[in-house]
Amino acid sequence: MKIFLILFMSILLNSSLFANNFSQKKIIKLEQQESFEIIDLQQNVEKQNLDQQKGIFDSSSLMSKKESIRKDNDVDFAIAMSFRQNFGYALDGFNISAKEFSTLFAKNLVDNLRLNFVNSAANGVYQDLRTLARFSPKDSKLLNVSPFLKKEKDKSQIYAKFTDYLVVVNLDDFYVNITNYFVAITKNAVANINFKVVSTSNGKILTSKNVRLNFALHAEDPRVNYQELVNQMPNMLAEVVNKELEKLNLTVQ
């Protein structure tokens, strides 16, 4: 009888512990929601105070034309983007190349940024290997984002407005964390991205930040997960960039 009682208590305790563990695992799974982390680099590459840095973007060729450019009250932006080879999607046998993934990511980002962008042709002035070499990691490749901007039909108006600031976005790293919790498996997509805001008047970096995006993947189908994250992650990044730009209180140059 004593042996039976001991066995019964043992089973009861183990069941209770298992239930508690299961409850904890469910909580862990629920806590893996969309989030982001921002790291202020403070011009970490140059290791100097932003107010003391020398201009590293030569806009002198454009400054000579500024007098003939139509002035307005809008703060106008250009955008340049790059990606590294490890910014690709691979999950459960479904693979998307870094270039394809980054291109769609870039398009959705541009669509969600609340910025007054210059037209497609004018943006091409800043989208070149010179910009890539100065603001992106050495192993990065240039993304052509100009097609995602509006096109100016009137050729005389293509360069009619002066670009005040350049936004540089580097898609540095992407991977999926898979964790097995005995009774459940969680999949969490992580993207490491750097963005900078550069003044075209003096070529100085006004802010440089690293952003880590986390996005929980809940679907069983890796294709569904891909569609969800490629739609939502750029929107998350756009919110971060929009808020950081608001803090800068940028004005027309």
Image: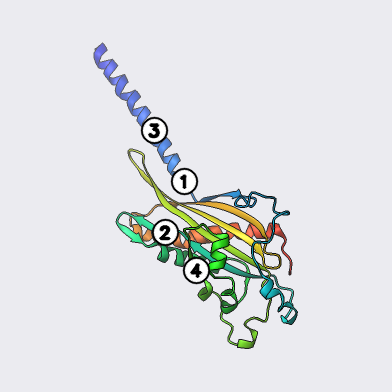
Q: Secondary structure at mark 2?
A: loop
- Given the image, on which type of amino acid does mark 2 rest? Gln
Q: Secondary structure at mark 4?
A: helix
Q: CA distance from mark 1 to mark 3?
A: 17 Å
Position of residue 22 measured from the top left corner of the image (x, y, whole percent): 38, 36
Q: How packed is label 2: few (under 14 Cα within 10 Å), some, or many (20 or more)? A: some
Residues marked 2 and 4 touching at CB (< 8 Å): no
Q: Earlier in the sequence, mark 1 or mark 4?
A: 1
For the N terminus, the image quarter is top left
Q: CA distance from mark 2 to mark 4?
A: 18 Å
Mark 4 vs mark 3, foreground winner is: 4
Q: CA distance from mark 2 to mark 1?
A: 26 Å
Q: Which mark is residue 107?
A: 4
Q: Check the image and report above or below for 237 versus 145.
A: above
Q: Which mark is residue 32?
A: 1
Taking depth in this image into account, of 244 and 158 the one nearest to the observer is: 158
Provide the residue designation for mark 3: 21
Residue 112 makes an appearance in the image? no
Q: Which mark is residue 85?
A: 2
